[in-house]
Amino acid sequence: MTLARSSSMVRVRYAETDQMGIAYHGNYLAWFEVGRTDLLREHGMTYKQLEGQDVRLPVIETRVVYRRPALYDDVLEIRTQLVEMSGARLRFEYDVVRNGEPEALAQGMTEHAAVDANGRPRRLPEELRRRLQ
């Protein structure tokens, strides 16, 4: 089964870099969020709509492997793919690629649990599951 994919573009802002012009490592998680929200939106579902259905998707696990630095003013492509979807969990993988280059600067993963507004586990809505397949 092929699951959802998307591609998002971000430009490394000055505020996201250190004195050497290298992107701070924590920004990659924010860029993963850009990829994830764009993927959901491209497949017809937003976080706001999920919250309206009493679904939250907190991050329960993350991993990032940094291969080469992203630099100030680089245009980055965040390639996002849903790789696993169970009854109440989603796992996304990410490649961060400098525009025009073949190799990933970083690769990562986030796993999310579906919970209600009170933090209790719940199943993913069938509509979301359908849209992401």
Image (cartoon, helix red, strand yellow):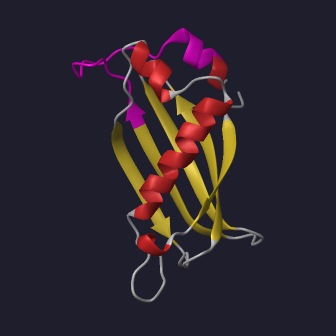
Residue 80 or 12: which is nearer the viewer? 12
Q: How many marks?
A: 0
At 47% from the left and 28% from the top, the residue drawn is 47
Q: Outermost residue, bottom direction?
A: 20
Q: x, y (%) of residue 25?
A: 41, 69
At 66% from the left and 27% from the top, the residue drawn is 43
The quadrant of the rendering that contains the C terminus is: top right
Which span of residues is magenta-colored?
112-130
Q: Outermost residue, left direction?
A: 118
Depicted 105 relative to depicted 41: above or below: below
Depicted 80 relative to depicted 101: above or below: above
Left or right: 15 as drawn, with respect to 96: left
Q: x, y (%) of residue 14?
A: 48, 75
> Based on the displayed image, in which of its 4 quarters is residue 126 positioned?
top right
At 49% from the left and 19% from the top, the residue drawn is 49
Q: x, y (%) of residue 10?
A: 60, 59
Residue 47 or 62: which is nearer the viewer? 47
Q: x, y (%) of residue 9?
A: 66, 56
Left or right: 61 as drawn, with respect to 11: left
> Based on the displayed image, in which of its 4 quarters is residue 29 positioned?
bottom left
Depicted 73 relative to depicted 83: above or below: below
The quadrant of the rendering that contains the N terminus is: top right
For the stretch drawn in magenta, the main secondary structure is loop
Left or right: 46 as drawn, with respect to 97: left
At 39% from the left and 50% from the top, the residue drawn is 62
Is 48 one of the magenta-colored residues? no
